[in-house]
Amino acid sequence: MGKFKDNYIVKAWLVLSIALIFGSSLAGVEIVLKPKIIANKLNETLSLIPYLIQEKEKEKSQNLKITFNKVEIEKNERKIFYNVIHTSRDGKTAGWVVKSKGPGYADKVELLIGFDPNMKYITGLFVIDQKETPGLGNKIIENNFRNQFLRINTENSLVAVKTGKRHPGEIDAITGATISSRSVCDIVNTVVKDLKQPLGSGSIKK
Amino acid sequence: MEFIAEIFLIAIGAALINNFVLYYFVGICPFIGVSKEVETAIGMGFAVTFVMVIASFISWSITTFILIPGAPISSFVAGFFLTPEKAASIDLTILSYIVYIFAIASSVQFVEMFVKKSYPLLYRSFGVFLPLITTNCAILFACLTIMSNVAGIDNPENAWGLSKAITLALFGGMGFTLAIVIMSGIREELNFADVPEPFKGAAITLIIAGILAMAFMGFTGVDSGIRRLLL
Amino acid sequence: MAELPTPTERFLQGILPENPVYRQLLGLCPTLAVTNNMKSAVTMAAAVAFVLFCANIIISLIRDLLKPHLRIVIFTLTIATFVTIVDKFLAAYVYSMSKELGPYIPLIIVNCIIICRCEVCASKQNVVAAASDAVGQSLGFALALFSIAGVREILGTGAFFELQILPSSWPNWIIMVLPPGAFFTLGLLLGLVNWLSNRSGKKAT
């Protein structure tokens, strides 16, 4: 029996030694590259924060303190978690940035939404991930569409309309991409509904 | 209710809207190679679905319990050598690709052995395709999709559970079966058509696949309507 | 047993006569998925070339030690390791590309081109032949990717490498950058290649 086992191990020595060599080289790759990958992921968000909370040009990102928080909400007896970025200057809240995902037309749409300290109005919006139809739905990343959200009051929930906006809380939908426009509005509405109370009232502060 | 709705949306998403073959282009090799007759296409489709579900189950379990930082088994083992905080931060996700490919290979072996012994009839209908499946990208793609919803996401609390992973694999496999069966039906008719010489075989199959993909594009956006109804 | 091709022959065969995409119909999954613009096609071609080159060399170096029944295990292990390295490298240095290509980089593991070259060439011939074979096959694969991506990007967005080249009056054929366009382009180009080679074959006889 022992001989039989030995035989198998001897036969597989090449596989085992190769696995060892590859394993250690992967460990090396991980140690060298992992900090870079994490930094890349963070930078994607961090570089946009000054634009999201409407910084004035000269004080851009200077002594802005950024903290990442996790906010827990209970909704329909289920716990929902949000990633909320709290920015402050000299101990005073400068604004909130919320990262949220929702279904788009083709795939998920991921947004960064900026709010003023009291969650009264939206101060910025970026689409950081989307796979909408090129030429139609992917216009949601363009400034023409994005800028409609600036300084919009969070009192009314947002509606994407096709015929030109008339009332507050209405957003001009992109021609031919009503569903994409609507999904952006829906994501913003959900975030406002869930987080307006906890963030605006100041019950969460770090 | 919300949970059932989510499962339902994953199911139609994987089977129709973002069809594995016609939207993500995975599993093209068997789609072109084994779609000459309806009967073999059905066999291939079932074999892929079967292996996909098992491989997804294995890879979901390994990812959740061993690979991700703070996974129970790896932090338990590492707890013997390291402090608890360090043990909980061990991240083995760099090994995930290697683990998945071996999970697929071994589940193919396992399925082949099991089916051959227990269901010889079934084995005769799709057994010959099983060895081919190891290098089928659709299965690795299902594992990777599940991984992207379990590891490296912002909120670990929103990670996919086993039921969602299995739903994706099952309906993804069914979407593959649907696409390959439709294609084989068309190709059986194609035998009677006068196709220009250079386009015979793969070229005309790809062009038909393009038309099919256009038809399946009609499903895009369906889920947003359903979501509004259900949620 | 027939004589194995020399390194130069291996190199030349890979580019056209045995082109992995147009002739052997291998690796169609990335060929279709990442060719909606030139940038991702270039990244994909480079990633495949790196993995193929490294895997071919390693397999060729250890070819005398390979046991027949453990052969495929070693191929897969080697390929998966190099794919992981490429994946992490892209995520660290070209983050936007790595995000765009997403699962298609790990899917190189099951790309039949690489395992096929390991089996056909690297496990039988010396390092020089294996290396030149890898270079030739990668060039052939890149050629195929670029031809498809070029057609799709130019017709679909009027641009090449994101540089506008068609007049702005060009109505962008959006279908070309969507999934169906990939199938149409590859199908038509494949027909064209078949037609051209049939014609030159007839002339020769």
Image (cartoon, rainbow, N blue to C red):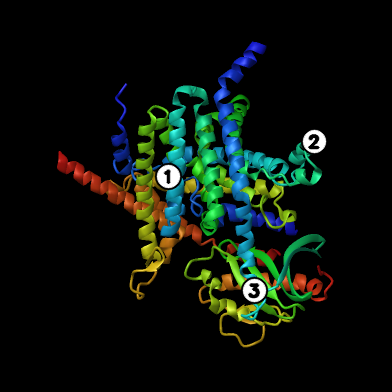
Tell which of A105 and A205 is nearer to you: A205
Q: Position of residue B204 (x, y in %)?
A: 35, 49
The chain letter for the residue carrying disc 3 is A
Give left or right: position of B173 versus A120.
left
Q: Which residue is mark 3?
A: A50
Q: Which residue is mark 2?
A: B80
Q: How many other residues sit within 10 Å of disc 2, few (<14), some (14-19) or many (≥20)?
A: few
The chain letter for the residue carrying disc 2 is B
> Is the residue B106 above or below the residue C149 in the image?
above
Of helix, strand and loop, which one carries label 1?
helix
Q: How many other residues sit within 10 Å of disc 3, few (<14), some (14-19) or many (≥20)?
A: many
Residue B20 in view in this figure:
no
* Kind of residue at badge 1: Ala
Tell me the distance, in whole angstroms, between the alpha carbons under discs 2 and 1.
42 Å
Tell me the distance, in whole angstroms, between the alpha carbons under discs 1 and 3.
40 Å
Contact (Cβ within 8 Å) of mark 1 with mark 3: no
Mark in the foreground, 1 or 3: 3
Residue at 63% x, 13% y is A4
Q: Which residue is mark 1?
A: C49
Q: Position of residue A181 (x, y in %)?
A: 58, 73
